[in-house]
Amino acid sequence: MNKLLTKTVRKGLLMTVVMAIVLAASIVVTALFGVNYAPTAQNSKTLTVTVNTFFYETKLEEVESVCENKFNELKLNAEYEQKGKMSGDDCEIIYYFAEDTDLSKAKEELSKAFADKISSEEGWGNAFITVASGSETLATNIPVSYFVRAAIAVAVISVLALVYVAVRYKSYMGLVAGPCALLGGVMTAAIVLLTRIPFTVSSLQPIVLASIVSAVIAMLSFNNLRANMRAENAKDKTAEELVIQSSACKETLCLAVLLGGAILLTGVIATTAASWFAVVAIVALAVSLFIGYVFAPAMTLALKEKADKKAAEKKSGYVGAKKTSMQKAREEKAEQTQE
């Protein structure tokens, strides 16, 4: 038997209470401090270093080193860095700072530092570098419509999971799949907001995907449970034994390894913005594994035991009630005939 599920399958109420506390804490923290938007989703001051393509491709690390050293001297904190090739012979490195940062001195001294290197250091003679400051003002951090669409997507996935599983498997399994899909998205969002992970537009995608993954992991176990319930020795096992033995351990592990590997690879080789996406995706995967593999069996066991008990009572109670009423009717008719 699965040792983890053996310890947790009877603790569905405890897990529900813990999730409720996390959700409540997230709501309170967000209400007090707001959403921790990533620098790219906030108003900011920018310092743009434009470099010719050849020097950018051969001396990029040295250019960045000059910028970072100068920022340290001036005690400036660059919240985010974005770089890439532009049209023509220009490439850019853009540093983002807080909205109230004064960059006039940084622009002047950085321009002077590059000019000194170009005029005096070997290997810098073919460099064309300019420094410009600017600002970015966003009309809104992330449009409300984006959040609404994500919420609708999670709700639709939950309803579809409930209906599909209820029709294909059992009605009580559908009552597990739907809430699990909903909890996958809700709890991912709650943990991201509570832990103050920088939030971007791309953060909404893992939140929606968490609903799908949670439902998929739960359905892997439902498929095994249906097969085990149809086995010849199913009557010799308790509901708890059937639920625990039906856990899709290998399938869930393979899914976790594949998705986790892809997420980590994205975080390692990607830009800062994509790295924050990877962090949210890791949270989403962890939540999905917990909901689909640990919480879903606990819900399934509780609902299965109620369904089995109800079915047994209905079967025995219905037959007895029908037989008794018929007997009473016959006795009353016989008494009327005798009179």
Image (cartoon, rainbow, N blue to C red):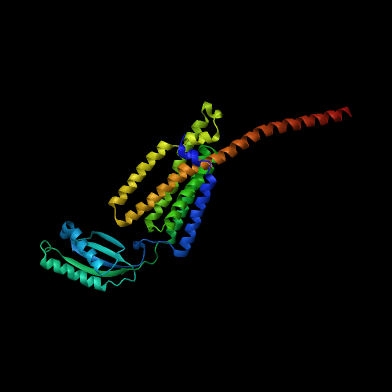
Residue 323 shown left or right of residue 124 in the figure: right
Q: Position of residue 187 (x, y in %)?
A: 46, 52
For the question of whether residue 164 can be seen, the reply is: no
Residue at image point 53% right, 27% down: 233
Residue at image point 49% right, 36% down: 244
- In the depicted structure, whether residue 318 falls above or below residue 39: above
Q: Position of residue 154 (x, y in %)?
A: 46, 51
**Residue extending farthest top:** 232
Q: Position of residue 102 (x, y in %)?
A: 29, 72
For the question of whether residue 21 can be seen, the reply is: yes
- In depth, the one of 227 and 336 nearer the eye is 227
Image quadrant where one finds the C terminus: top right
- In the depicted structure, whether residue 243 falls above or below residue 34: above
Q: Position of residue 223 (x, y in %)?
A: 47, 35
Toward which corner of the image does residue 272 lie, by quadrant? bottom left
Residue at image point 47% right, 45% down: 291
Residue 48 shown left or right of residue 320 in the figure: left
- In the depicted structure, whether residue 60 falls above or below residue 236: below
**Residue extending farthest right:** 339
The total of numbered circles placed on residues is 0
